[in-house]
Image: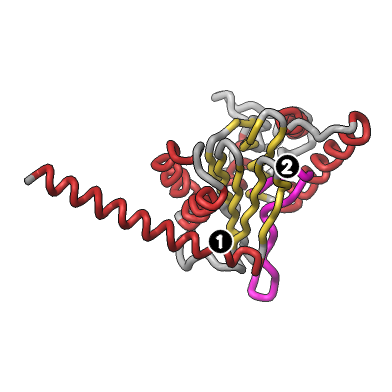
Amino acid sequence: MFRNQYDSDVTVWSPQGRLYQVEYAMEAVKQGAAVVGIKSKTHVVLTAFKRATDDLAANQKKILAIDDHIGVGFSGLTADAQVLTKFLRMECLNSKYAYDTPHSVARLVAALGTKMQICTQVYGRRPFGVGFLVAGFDETGSHLIQTCPSSNYYDCKAMAIGARSQSARTYMERKLEEFSECDKKTLIAHGLAALRECLSDGDLDIKNCSVAVIGKGEDFQVYDGDAVAPFLPLLDKDIKRKLLQDKTQSEAEAMDTS
């Protein structure tokens, strides 16, 4: 990314048909802390890596509850995320007040996309520099939806955003066929295993990761700090299972060649 004569405002098109301000906002998402989302038929799990601005500061929360049946994980500018989560919460409150029913996840994300799109078309404003993974469960089932600063949104089976998220996506592509039938505990194990792929060094612990779960008959619940501790042993079990599968596969291949 570099400055050029076509990136002075979000309404300026380049000759190649690009909006550089939108691309810069999407780059801010790519450089944010990693967030992973995985969906099964009955549950949606979010896992997020929390960073601290310095040694004296607490780690920033990367997963926020919107309503009993909806929550978000985000990567990018925290201040922008706070503004948009406030908007989402107000939409959910208005739905309960006006219709006495929880807000549909799909309609809520569509409203979010409309709000974000305005900033890509109006002079003197900048795009929101944040991307969301929206996790929800309503009468139509489980939902995992990715939103981008460009205001596009995508329904996903599994997704990772943020720094080094390609490693997590590679892991999830290998395991994709398993996710739909996974129970809650197995889905969390996959989420933590995918998140660990995003780390450049160190390992996950109670200080640097968050877990959130929502499912059929369950409200959206965020686990931070000591509440994450019961889930970390699932990661070790997942490693042992993976090593056992790899060993079995290697032995089978050896037998075939012989």
State the image coordinates of residue 215 (x, y, percent, origin top left): 65, 43
Q: Residue at x 60, y 54 (%)?
A: 48
Which mark identifies residue 247? Answer: none
Above or below, 126 relative to 59: above
Provide the residue span drawn in magenta: 53-74
Element assignment for label 2:
strand
Residue sitting nearer the eye, 45 or 26: 45
Q: Quadrant of the N terminus?
A: top right
Q: Which of 224 and 249 is in front in this view?
A: 249
Looking at numbered disc 2 in the image, what kind of residue is underneath it? Ile
**In the image, 222: left or right of 252?**
right
In this view of the protein, can residue 207 be seen by the observer? yes
* Residue shown at 68% from the left, 28% from the top: 140
The residue identified by callout 2 is: 70
Q: Which of 155 and 51 is in front in this view?
A: 155
Observer-side mark, 1 or 2, equals 1
Mark 2 neighbour class, 10 Å CA radius: few under 14, some 14 to 19, many 20 or more: many
Return the residue found at the far front: 217
Q: In which quarter of the image is residue 123?
A: top right
Pinpoint residue 118: horizontal percent, then vertical percent.
77, 30
Measured along the vertical axis of the image, is residue 78 above or below residue 9? below
In magenta segment, residue 64: yes
In the displayed structure, 208 sits above or below 133; it is below
Q: Residue 200, position in %: x, y?
A: 46, 61
Tell me the residue that label 1 is attached to.
231
